[in-house]
Image (cartoon, coloured by chain):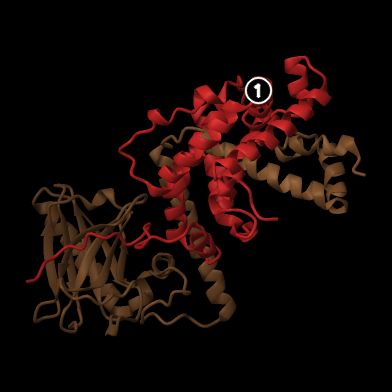
Amino acid sequence: MTPDPIDEMLGAYALDALTPEERAIVDAYLPTSPSSQEEVTQLSAVADQLALTAIPRDPPPALRARLLDIVEREAAEWRSAQDAAHDSPRPLTGAASPTSPNPNSLQKSRFRRALGRFPAYAYGAGGALVAAAVILLVVLANRNGVTVTPHSGSAVAQVVDGVRLAGVHFTVDVRSDHTTAVHFQGLPDLPPGRAYELWLIPAHGKPVPVGGFVGNAGHAFTSTYTLDAARYAEAAVTIERAPGDASTPSPYLALAAKLS
Amino acid sequence: MRVYVRTTAVTGTVGEEQSDEDLVARLRERDAGAFAALYDRYSRMAFGLAYRMLNDPTAAEDVAQEAFLSVWRQAETFHPERSAARTWILSIVHHRAVDRLRRGATTQEVSDASLEYAPDRVDESIDVEHEVSALMEANEIHRALGLLPLEQRRAIEMAYFGGLSHSEIAGKLRIPVGTVKGRLRIGLQKMRVLLDKAGLQGAVHDA
């Protein structure tokens, strides 16, 4: 015979309306009474459904951005820890399998880690040359009354989608006239049907595609856009399939630069 | 020079429709895209529930944030054989809100859930399959709640939305604690029968 006082508490138990002491009593009792356990399961299911009677409301938009910022940062840290634990980097080419980690998270992780490896000495003489060129650009720009804030970028990975990127350098010039100039050097030729694509990534929110491009005969590309990159946190380049090509582009970032 | 623009975003989206359970499974691999998809699917319900309980937008935002971070960080605690992912997420929101109410961080005047629930007030431009499905279920739940005797419904609402213990409910209503226990239990039992008759199978899980 089930003790009546405890069964009487099952509704309150399902609604989480017991004191901790009473809850502990019911928790200890339930394993001894399958029928009471069954009732708790059923009543709890009903109680859970009450949540649906609240009117859905739009949360503040900033909440999504704030959460995603936290989540992406923790995902990057988790991947770093995973990589360190395995002591062997994941291959950067090839399509992700259905059970693979989401490439979006992976690329963001790699992006952030790559940014952390951006010291000037990383590319030796090439880096010094880029730095000198950047200083020269600043001087020249100031002569025209336009302030230019250059940001240097480089390869995130040695090879992406079969394209070797180790020698690529680029600068993103954020100009005070609210335009943005980009200069790429050492761009490898791409296989047919592919192109580079430049993205600007805000601190919160979705990346914005700026445009696609390919290198010229000198493996360079320069362009000026009528947009203000100062509003973005990062610039990145991916290798994309041309329109009409049904194959899946590599999910990985090729090049990246910090803008703030 | 070929110049073209891709319209898809690099991060924060999931390209194809996936079940809630699949998305939660992906959280275990720290998949931020899956998190974004779940957030987009249930943030309105979560915030609405927190707001309903706390009657304070700032507190509701705090609770929603805490709850979604719990979803992100404790995806391993989700057991699909025990409940639907939506139920799991909203139960986390509920527990967080109850915790806040019991800490006294927010005071709430418990209102009548039947007044709070008003499907016609929901923005019809929101074409979200999951939310529409939930609203259809909510309609049945609301109907079942409305069929309960007023005193049972009131006790259930005070417990669930007000986060009150049975003794606190007894104090507010000036009735014996035993009476409150009975109303909560019998009310839920009646609701279960009504929801079963309505064919709302999601209301009851297999043991």
- The residue lying toward the viewer, choosing from B76 and A141, is B76
Chain B on-screen colour? red
Q: Position of residue B87 (x, y in %)?
A: 57, 48
- Give SS at disc 1: loop
Q: Residue furthest top?
A: B174
Q: Quadrant of the C terminus of chain B?
A: bottom right
Q: Position of residue B57 (x, y in %)?
A: 49, 29
Residue occupying image coordinates x 43% and y 34%? A57
Q: Is residue B144 left or right of residue A34?
A: left
Residue occupying image coordinates x 25% and y 61%? A199
Q: Is residue A125 left or right of residue A225?
A: right
State whether residue A79 appears in this view: yes
Q: Quadrant of residue A182?
A: bottom left
Q: Quadrant of residue A250?
A: bottom left
Q: Which residue is mark 1?
A: B149
Q: Is residue A206 left or right of residue B55?
A: left
Q: Position of residue B37 (x, y in %)?
A: 42, 54
Say if A7 sits above or below B112 in the image: below
Chain letter, colour brown: A
